[in-house]
Image (cartoon, rainbow, N blue to C red):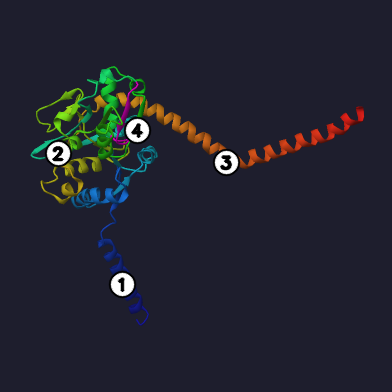
Amino acid sequence: MSHTLPRFAHTTALLLVAGLLCLQPAQAALVKIGVFSPEGFATGMQRWQPSADYLGQQIPAHRFQMLPYQDLGELEDDTRRGKFDFVLTHPASFVQLEQQAGLIRLLTRRHRDGALQHTSAAVVIFTRADNRIQGLADFARTPFVTTRAQDYSSWQLVQLELERLGQDPDHALSEVTFAGDSEAVLDGVMSGDYPAGAMAARDFDRFLRQGRISPQAVQILEASETPGFPFRFSGRLYPQWPLGVLPDTPAELRQAVEQSLLALPEGHVALEAGHYAGWQPADNYHAVRPLLSKSLSRHVVERQLSVANLWLEQHRQTLLITLVFTLLAWLLIRLFAHPRKLARS
């Protein structure tokens, strides 16, 4: 009897502990969302983690983590490696990843400008009013200034507009300077350093409202206006950023994320932090596909260069040793050959 009670108590304690462990909630599965963040990691986290936290509240079986990338190439490489479940990037990058990684469009980000909400992006291509250039067709080996190479609402849309009008950007522009931001682009054009430049339509409108630009001092090339879009712009409108999902992401998770983001309530902290108005079903990104051939060819060249650099890095020591022995052999041959020449003479 004395041995039975302790054994019974021990067994009972184990069963209680096991029961308590079963009652503990299972650890939430981690969901990774890659985000292109030109402003950097810290700003990207401040801007997008509240949206991830909202998803975690709506889908408690999962924990959502935003992974901001300032380098678009690194984001695209990690997407191809399958590092993420979802990816938020600009449309030119999306159509490339759609082809290379099977990325599937899920939702399109909605913007708010004043009282208007929209899902469009547009560029302003402009010159000084006293410039001889009247349209994009007048570009002929013209120096040009814009913000950044990977800026969708600036340089990417400039390429689309030039190609839409039958202009090859490589021939229409003699050089393209990436000044970094819209302020520098404005200064470059208005000072006369560049005949023409481009920036996001939103930034150009802000400079007009601030009095930084007089409407009489500039001309917008291929100027357009569209009801429902608050700014004047060049050419045509293009779709806003999509949220894409990787093909191996479970369908239940994909559907839960889609429904939760579509139901994101007005005034939520995630909208305030992210500077956007919400989400809607994904737009068609066919208009952006002309950039695909350029981005794919650039990726192939970069891939070839990276493979070549890797081979050189791995075989650098062998190449140096081979070079040293070749030089020594050449010197020895010269040394032995020189006495024989003297002897003959």
Residue 226 vs residue 25, the one in the foreground: 226
Residue 23 place in picture, x, y as percent:
25, 62
In the picture shown, does residue 316 fall above or below 193? Answer: below
Q: Secondary structure at mark 1?
A: helix
Graded by Cα atoms within 10 Å as few (under 14), some (14 to 19) or many (20 or more), the crowding at tag 1 reads few
- Judged left or right of residue 276, residue 19 is right
Give the mark, 3 or 2, whose residue is nearer the N terminus. Answer: 2
Q: Secondary structure at mark 4?
A: strand
In the rendered view of the protein, which quadrant contains the C terminus?
top right
Give the mark, 3 or 4, whose residue is nearer the N terminus. Answer: 4
Provide the residue designation for mark 1: 13
Graded by Cα atoms within 10 Å as few (under 14), some (14 to 19) or many (20 or more), the crowding at tag 4 reads some
Mark in front: 1 vs 3: 3
Task: Assess whether mark 4 and mark 1 are in contact (beta carbons under 8 angstroms).
Answer: no
Mark in front: 3 vs 4: 4
Q: Residue at position x 14%, y 39% from top?
A: 211
Mark in front: 2 vs 4: 2
- The answer for how far apart the CA atoms under marks 3 and 4 are is 35 Å
Q: Residue at position x 31%, y 28% from top?
A: 144
Q: Secondary structure at mark 2?
A: loop
